[in-house]
Amino acid sequence: MKQVYTESILLIERLHRRFLDVVKAELDRLKIDDVNNVQTLILYNIGEEQLTIGELTNRGYYLGSNVSYNVKKLVENGYLEQARAQHDKRSTRIKLSEKAIILCKKIDELYQRNIDVLSKETNQNELSSLNKTLIQLENFWTNYINNIHKVK
């Protein structure tokens, strides 16, 4: 079990890096150089929502990188629009700009091309089963972290 567990951890990490490489290759193909792969996924995950930076962080859309730095760069490069929240002037809300919406449509096209090829090699049930297992592992780790904090 230990060998399979450690192999799973390594695969998850490797798959995440490989997918970032896929997004980077697509940005290169599109000749887009003012946004990186992590920032692109942040934009894609925001979608049509308006969020605070705290909400962005809590939802995990930041993908383990420095969310404040990435938001600042995305605002500077015209991908995010920032405005003070109406109910709390100390808080700022972010949303996609038109430039970001166009980029997200291109990333959605990438996803569809990937799905078209992947569906010839695997099926939805296999991916659903994989997702279920990954969610169980995420829940296991979350519970572990929560229980460690209770012990202290």
Image (cartoon, grey):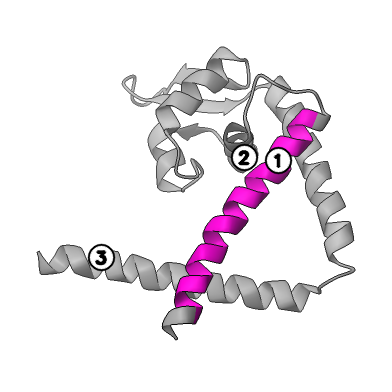
**What secondary structure characterizes most of the magenta part?**
helix
Distance from the alpha carbon under mark 3 to that under mark 1: 33 Å
Categorize mark 1 by other alpha carbons within 10 Å: few (<14), some (14-19), many (20+). Answer: some
Q: In this figure, which residue is indicated by the disc labeled 3? A: 146
Q: Residue placed farthest to the front in the image?
A: 3
- In front of the other: 89 or 20: 20
Q: Is residue 26 above or below residue 150?
A: above
Quadrant the C terminus occupies: bottom left
Distance from the alpha carbon under mark 2 to that under mark 1: 8 Å
Is label 2 in a helix, a strand or a loop? helix
Q: Residue at x 45, y 67 (%)?
A: 138
Callout 2, which amino acid?
A: Leu
Q: Position of residue 6 (x, y in %)?
A: 45, 72
Q: In this figure, which residue is indicated by the disc labeled 1? A: 23
Q: Position of residue 57 (x, y in %)?
A: 42, 41
Q: Find residue 41 and name its label.
A: 2
- In front of the other: 63 or 43: 63
- Find out whether the residues at labels 2 and 1 contact each other: C-beta distance under 8 Å: yes
Q: Is residue 100 above or below residue 58?
A: above
Q: Which residues are the magenta region?
A: 4-28
